[in-house]
Amino acid sequence: MDDDCIFCKIATGTLPSYTIYEDGEYKIILDRFPWIGGHTLIILKRHAETFFELTKQEGARLFEMTSAAANALNNTLTPDGLNIIQNNGEAAGQSVAHFHMHIIPRYKNDEINILFPHNDPPVADFEKILPGIKINFKI
């Protein structure tokens, strides 16, 4: 636990939260500063900054938690869609250095703007990076 980390304080109950579910590894809460009603966070209780620090067990459990939370939001709020977002590092938009996943209900014309530009790179760009990624791919 990091004494200065807001998510560690929420995970331990030092700070209050609107808790949906918790177990020994994860706490699922409504975001206190949501983009939209129902914006949910899945917080790892153990302090780890990014996805890369999760154990295999924590990673497997994360997808179970994500599925359960997404289904609960979908069945309760009946949104038009859901964003499931996890940011790693400041350059990727991570604002709290403690692992967490966002589940954000979406509605047509909700004015939330999450856009990713699309490119059409030359074949050489793919051929340049693919071998290195394949070498580093480990299960």
Image: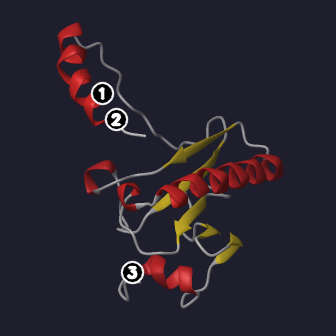
According to the image, label 2 marks what residue? 137
Q: Quadrant of residue 51?
A: bottom left
**Mark 3 crowd level (few <14, some 14–19, many ≥20, 10 Å Cα):** some
Name the side, left or right, on which 123 lies relative to 70: left
Task: Say whether marks 2 and 1 touch (CB < 8 Å).
Answer: yes
Residue 34 lies, with reference to residue 93, above or below; the image says below
The foreground one among 37 and 101 is 101
**Disc sitting over residue 5 in the figure:** 3
Which residue is under mark 1?
134
Where residue 136 sits: x, y (%)? 28, 36
Residue 109 in picture, x, y percent from top left: 62, 36
- Give the left or right position of residue 79, taking residue 14 as reference: right
Residue 127 in the figure: left or right of residue 13 = left
Mark 2 residue type = Phe
Q: Position of residue 102 (x, y in %)?
A: 54, 55
Marks 1 and 3, Cα distance to the nearest angstrom?
Answer: 36 Å
Classify residue 125 by image quadrant. Answer: top left
- Quadrant containing the C terminus is top left
Amino acid marked by disc 3: Cys
Choose top left, top right, bottom left or bottom right for residue 106.
top right
Q: Quadrant of the N terminus?
A: bottom left
